Image (cartoon, helix red, strand yellow):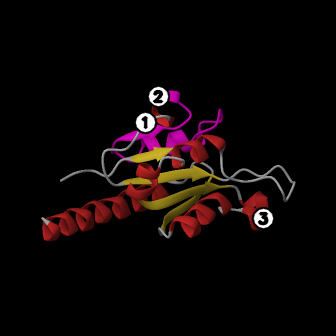
């Protein structure tokens, strides 16, 4: 069964990267040019942090994520969004994941704070495994 890859953006802090690398599946860092300019080979999940600098007009979606989503193919193959955030951002907590989900019509699969807890990692792994199984069943029904 195909393990749905996670494409993520992680800043220099590495918090999102740390979480992504614990998911036990293919992960690709959109901070790296080769991944940001690539096209996916099937269904995928986006993991994005939300950043806010205090200016309401500043967007919370990282530019690398925006660039990756400019590809119509990548947008079509997106199946779910996950978010990392910091509750200190108040109403902007998880805004990037929620906005991308709203615009794309895809669900928010999971949200966690900062680098996540061991429970967050286990729960996210379980949800991604359930997603893998659902996609495999859908593909088998279509084929």
Residue at x 52%, y 38% (from the top left corner):
30
* SS at mark 2 in the image: helix
**Residue at image mark 1:** 38
**Residue 50 location (% of width, % of height):** 67, 53
For label 3, the residue is 90
The residue carrying pointer 1 sits among few (fewer than 14), some (14 to 19) or many (20 or more) residues within 10 Å by Cα, namely few
Residue displayed at 51% across by 51% down? 47
Tell me which label, 1 or 3, sits earlier in the chain.
Answer: 1
63 shown above or below 97: above
**Residue tagged by mark 2?**
34
Pair 3/2: label in front: 2
| 65 vs 85, nearest the viewer | 65
Q: Is residue 125 left or right of residue 102?
A: left
Q: Which residues fall within the magenta stretch?
A: 9-33
Residue at image coords 41%, 48%: 6
Crowding near pointer 3: few (<14 within 10 Å), some, many (20+)? few
């Amino acid at each position: 069964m195909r393990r749905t890859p996670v494409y993520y953006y992680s800043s220099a802090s590495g918090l999102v990267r740390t979480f992504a690398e614990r998911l036990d599946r293919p992960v690709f860092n959109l901070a790296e040019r080769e991944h940001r300019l690539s096209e996916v080979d099937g269904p995928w999940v986006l993991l994005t942090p939300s950043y806010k600098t205090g200016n309401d007009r500043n967007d919370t979606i990282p530019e690398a994520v925006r660039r990756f989503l400019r590809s119509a193919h990548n947008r079509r193959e997106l199946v779910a969004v996950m978010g990392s955030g910091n509750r200190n951002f108040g109403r902007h907590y998880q805004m990037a994941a929620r906005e991308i989900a709203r615009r794309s019509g895809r669900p928010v699969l999971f949200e966690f704070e900062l680098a996540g807890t061991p429970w967050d990692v286990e729960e996210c792994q379980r949800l991604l495994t359930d997603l893998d199984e659902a996609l495999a069943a859908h593909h088998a029904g279509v084929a």
